Image: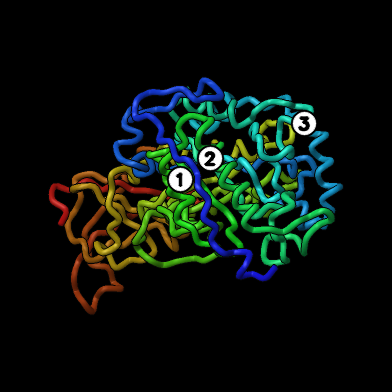
Amino acid sequence: MNRREMIKISALALSSNSLSKSFGISKYGNYPILDNANGIHAIPGGWFDKKKYGMFIHWGLYAIPGWHEQHQMRARVPRNEYVKLADQWNPKEFNPVEWLDILQESGMEYLTFTTKHHDGFCLWDTRYTDFNVMNTPYKKDILGMLAEECHKREVPLSLYYSIVDWNHKNYPNMNRHHELKGPEPGDEPDWDKYMLFLKNQVKELCSNYGEICGFWWDMNVPEFYDRSINEMIRNLQPNVIINDRGFDEGDFGTPERDFNPDSQSTFNKLTEACQSVGMESWGYRKDEDYYTDRHLISSIDRYRARNANYLLNIGPKPSGKLPREGVAKLDRIGKWYNAVKESFEDITPAPELVINRDVMLTKRENTLYVHLNKPSQGNAILLKPINSLPKKATLLNDGREIESIVRLNPSGHAEGKAYLNLVNLPVNESCNTVLVIKLEFDDLV
């Protein structure tokens, strides 16, 4: 089978019964379908512009060896050996209440969850493959339990789904990126049959678990294009927002792990950056190396100050508990985020107000927020060409007052003009975080 044959578009008739706009109940469980609950969805995807900091969860069989979420491929484990991990899957300490408590205490506002990663193991009660959580010693619908708790708290739930599948016999593994080297024994590569399987699973996910607020595709390796798939999702879930890694351009971009550092001051489309607390793996890793608080806080600030969303990942242990080190990091980052959150809410990025590119600015009416996103070279910041004093300057991190002065600095002698400076900043005592200073003006042009 050649590549052209594998990626040809098949016309598949799928029913697309729309969800009722009124409050409803899922066919397979008591998961409420919310309608404009507390303003989460004023328009399709409207929640995405209000709830901007989310938790990403990568969880699956790969947590058992505890090395990497791509354990099967990277450790060169034959499929017939890897699938035996399902016999050990029994996360007795999984408690969605505890997960959601940590999410909310960390300042996070929505959840994106891996329903199926590249290994093909499904964390919900699917009728389309036996390789799922119901055929393990655990025998419980993890997605169902998690969805129920999200709906109780009105926490938007987004579902991750991998297009690449290392278990399904019809997926054409061809040694492209994120694929197995080739078909495994017993495989029958057939793209059209695999797409039928995929669409049936997606329809299942979007029909059986109440309101789904986001759909997070990953790894469209064949670069197959078919708008009808996202249209089906939107018909089933009218308020959903969909990323750009699926079968069309989607609704929002997904820069990952700062792989491609950018210098643009704003984004021309909706954007959600994603990062993990661990340096090596998105899933649980027993001996994980962790990013510094400063690195993660700076990354979050760099995107949020440009009005982008941010998704921070943690990988649960095979027991279902979130790792202590990761939770502690989320807690520390959450304390920073909650303290400076107002600098990200209902703001406009305002890089044009100063020439200093060592800081980032956000603005709301006559209030300006100065983000010391990069490590500061000194304890003062020049905000040229602003030449007026704020009526008040406050460090959001701890509420202390900040000194401000309009002065001519020796380095500006040639121009001979005085500009606003923020001085005696507590940079040495705060070198593991990002300082955010609130400046309130009578009139900020």
Which residue lies at the image location 74% right of the left edge and 41% below the top edge? 61
For the C terminus, give its image quadrant. bottom left
Q: Are marks 1 and 2 in contact (CB under 8 Å)?
A: yes
Q: Residue at x 19, y 47 (%)?
A: 365
* Disc ID at residue 124: none
Residue 422, position in %: x, y?
Answer: 31, 55
Q: Badge 3, how many Cα within 10 Å: few under 14, some, many 20+?
A: some
Residue 256 spot, x, y in % from top left = 54, 57
Q: Earlier in the sequence, mark 1 or mark 2?
A: 2
Secondary structure at numbered mark 2: helix
Instruction: Tell me the kind of residue under disc 3.
Output: Thr
Mark nearest the camera among 3 and 1 is 1
Q: 164 or 48: nearer the eye?
A: 164
Q: Are marks 3 and 1 in contact (CB under 8 Å)?
A: no
Q: Which residue is mark 2?
A: 203
Where does the image place residue 107, in percent across and percent down from the top left? 46, 35
User: Counting residues from the N terminus, which is met first, the one under dot 2 or under dot 3?
Assistant: 3
**Farthest-out residue, left:** 443
Viewer-nearest residue: 426 or 135: 135
Q: How is the image coloured?
A: rainbow
Please determine whether, in this image, residue 355 is positioned above or below residue 140: below
Q: Residue furthest right?
A: 81
Residue 242 vs residue 144: left or right? left
Quadrant assignment for the N terminus? bottom right
Label 1 secondary element:
helix
Residue tagged 3:
136
Q: Which mark is residue 232?
A: 1
Point 48% across, 31% down: residue: 104
> Residue at the top extreme?
30
Residue pictured at 53% horizontal, 51% vertical? 12
Q: Specify few, some or many for label 2: CA neighbours under 10 Å numbering under 14, 14-19, or 20 or more.
A: some
